[in-house]
């Protein structure tokens, strides 16, 4: 089946630095990739929708300058958390729509210290 | 806008007990409905889905029926196992122009004891 590879699975960074998270579609072309954030014991919050070759669409309240999304090819979408702060610590998950299904990456646990 | 409401958790059951997790939704048009399962520290896995009214999704002993009249998609399993312990999310995908994004319920933590 369709697989989305997400890495890193865990990252610890210092406050003020930037972190890049990658999601690759391994055996299909992902025209659209969704980026979610999940706080402990809570649901997934859609942050943005990225479309190959165009600007991402951000959900209300999500800072586009802080969460940079790039979808330069049909198999790679990246989320960069810029100038990270402890409140950005969270679990980030990407997802791609494949026909009428959705496949998810395994998630990235970001800890900002 | 679209929304999904799941029953409050957490849910704790003994092995072989019957499971029901309620899910209701609000949506315009004709959404597709999903149940996803998340194990600790992992992403989401599709458990089952239904794309139109009266469809029944089923997988690994779990079932859910798309009820348009009650806008519900309750998850059931006749006999749970310890390995079913996880977080379960009900979700819908709109059929409109928003790139088919998923809207999730708040999740229900299920713990099954031997």
Image: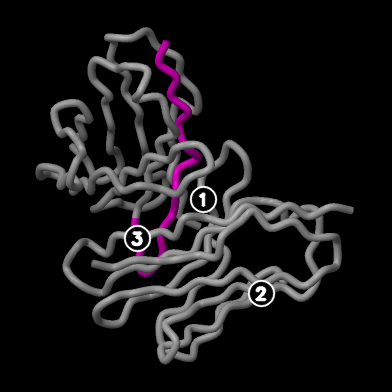
Q: Could you say where residue A28 lies in the image, as x and y percent from the top left?
A: 36, 53
Give SS at disc 2: strand
Of mark 2 and mark 3, the one earlier in the sequence is 2
Q: Do labels 2 and 3 share a chain?
A: yes
Instruction: Please say if B106 is above or below A8.
Output: below
Please tell me whether mark 1 sits on a helix, a strand or a loop. Answer: strand
Q: Do the residues labelled 1 and 3 touch (CB within 8 Å)?
A: no
In this view of the protein, which residue sits in the foreground, B39 or A8? B39
Q: Residue B70 carries which label?
A: none
Q: Name the residue under label 2.
A: B76
- Which numbered marker is on residue B102? 3
Instruction: Identify the residue shown where x is 53% and y is 42%.
Output: A41
Given this view, does label 1 or label 2 mark the residue nearer the observer?
2
In this rendering, would A36 be left or right of B62?
A: left
Is-magenta flag for residue A100?
yes
- Residue picked out by circle 1: B44
Give the spatial CA distance, label 2 vs label 3: 21 Å
Which segment is the magenta one? A97-113
**The one of B9 and A96 positioned closer to us in this rendering:** B9
């Amino acid at each position: 089946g369709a697989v989305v590879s997400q890495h890193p699975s865990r990252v610890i960074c210092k406050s003020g630095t930037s972190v890049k998270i990658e999601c690759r579609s391994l055996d299909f072309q992902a025209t659209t990739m969704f980026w979610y954030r999940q706080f402990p014991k809570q649901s997934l919050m859609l942050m943005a929708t990225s479309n190959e070759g165009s600007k991402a669409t951000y959900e209300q309240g999500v800072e586009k300058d802080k969460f940079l999304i790039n979808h330069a090819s049909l198999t790679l979408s990246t989320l960069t958390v810029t100038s990270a702060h402890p409140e950005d610590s969270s679990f980030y998950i990407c997802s791609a729509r494949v026909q009428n299904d959705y496949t998810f990456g395994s998630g990235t646990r970001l800890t900002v210290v | 806008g679209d929304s999904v409401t799941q029953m409050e958790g957490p849910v704790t059951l003994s092995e072989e007990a019957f499971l029901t997790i309620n899910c209701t939704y609000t949506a315009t048009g004709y959404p597709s409905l999903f149940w996803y399962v998340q194990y600790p520290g992992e992403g989401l896995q599709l458990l089952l889905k239904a794309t139109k009214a009266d469809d029944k999704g089923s997988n690994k002993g779990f079932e859910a029926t798309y009820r348009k009249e009650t806008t519900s998609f309750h998850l059931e399993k006749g006999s749970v196992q310890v390995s079913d312990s996880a977080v379960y999310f009900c979700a819908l995908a709109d059929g409109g122009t928003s790139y088919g994004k998923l809207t999730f319920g708040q999740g229900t933590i299920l713990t099954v004891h031997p």
